[in-house]
């Protein structure tokens, strides 16, 4: 914080990288979410800010788990800022899109990050045939980016499409195999009649007497 106060021309990404890879991990840690150096200087000294998290870390007591959600987590332009700013994320997204375009003939970057944000384009990502590959691309690329930053999972768990991401990262499938499988699965599911789903916050014992 003192360094930032006396050095206005530093690159925020360089500061974050140095803190992650060039400094010893200490027990007392503080993390904050900011968009520029000026905001960082303000938030470092703001004890009541919702953007600042201060914790005591007991090394070795906790493990890192990557959790990958399934269909329903998608939205237009998900990860767009990461795509613009983080080379590793952008490279992984581009690689996935290139492989999938060879398989499907579809420009997947236009599905994820459409230039024309009219109603039709906003709806494209919510079509099952597009949703599932798009979620895979985002989750896989984000995981690879975290690993680039030195954040490796001790375990992984996924739901629905997220299971395929976890399996691919674990080496069960190659990236091309996983994308082919996800695309074919999504295409077949798109052809089925529409279904519905309900989520009930209750135990099995509470629900069974109510079921016909």
Image (cartoon, rainbow, N blue to C red):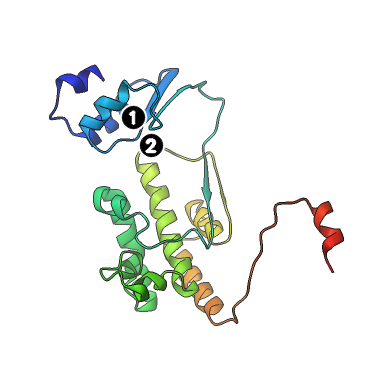
x and y percent of residue 135 in the render?
45, 61
Q: Which residue does the numbered mark 1 point to in the structure image?
A: 20
The residue lying at 42 percent from left, 61 percent from top is: 75
x and y percent of residue 182 in the render?
49, 68
Tell me the crowding category of disc 2: few under 14, some 14 to 19, or many 20 or more residues within 10 angstroms, Cα based.
few
Ranked by sequence position, the earlier of labels 2 and 1 is 1
Q: Which residue does the numbered mark 2 point to in the structure image?
A: 150
Spatial CA distance of label 2 from label 1 is 8 Å
Q: The residue tagged with tag 1: helix, strand or loop?
A: helix
x and y percent of residue 6 in the render?
15, 19
Query: Residue 1's quadrant in the figure?
Result: top left
**Could you tell me if residue 172 is visible in this image?**
no
Q: Which mark identifies residue 82?
A: none
Which of label 2 and label 1 is nearer to you? 1
Q: Quadrant of the C terminus?
A: bottom right
Instruction: In the rendered view, tell whether residue 89 sits above or below residue 129.
Output: above
Residue 76 vs residue 167: left or right?
left
Tell me the crowding category of disc 1: few under 14, some 14 to 19, or many 20 or more residues within 10 angstroms, Cα based.
some
């Amino acid at each position: 914080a003192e360094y930032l106060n006396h050095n206005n021309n530093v690159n925020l990404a360089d500061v974050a990288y140095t803190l992650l890879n060039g400094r010893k991990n200490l027990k007392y840690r503080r993390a904050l979410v900011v968009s520029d150096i000026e905001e960082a200087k303000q938030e470092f000294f703001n004890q009541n800010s919702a953007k600042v998290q201060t914790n005591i870390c007991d090394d070795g007591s906790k493990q890192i788990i990557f959790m990958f959600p399934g269909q329903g987590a998608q939205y237009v332009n998900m990860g767009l800022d990461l795509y613009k700013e983080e080379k590793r994320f952008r490279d992984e997204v581009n690689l996935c899109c290139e492989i999938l375009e060879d398989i499907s003939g579809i420009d997947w970057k236009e599905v994820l990050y459409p230039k024309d944000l009219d109603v039709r384009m906003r709806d494209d990502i919510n079509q099952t045939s597009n949703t599932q590959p798009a979620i895979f691309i985002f989750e896989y690329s984000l995981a690879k980016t975290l690993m680039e930053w030195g954040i490796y999972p001790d375990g992984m768990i996924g739901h629905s499409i997220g299971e395929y991401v976890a399996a691919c990262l674990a080496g069960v499938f190659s990236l091309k195999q996983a994308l082919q499988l996800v695309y074919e699965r999504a295409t077949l599911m798109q052809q089925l009649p529409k279904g519905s789903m309900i989520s009930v916050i209750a135990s099995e014992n509470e629900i069974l007497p109510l079921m016909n």
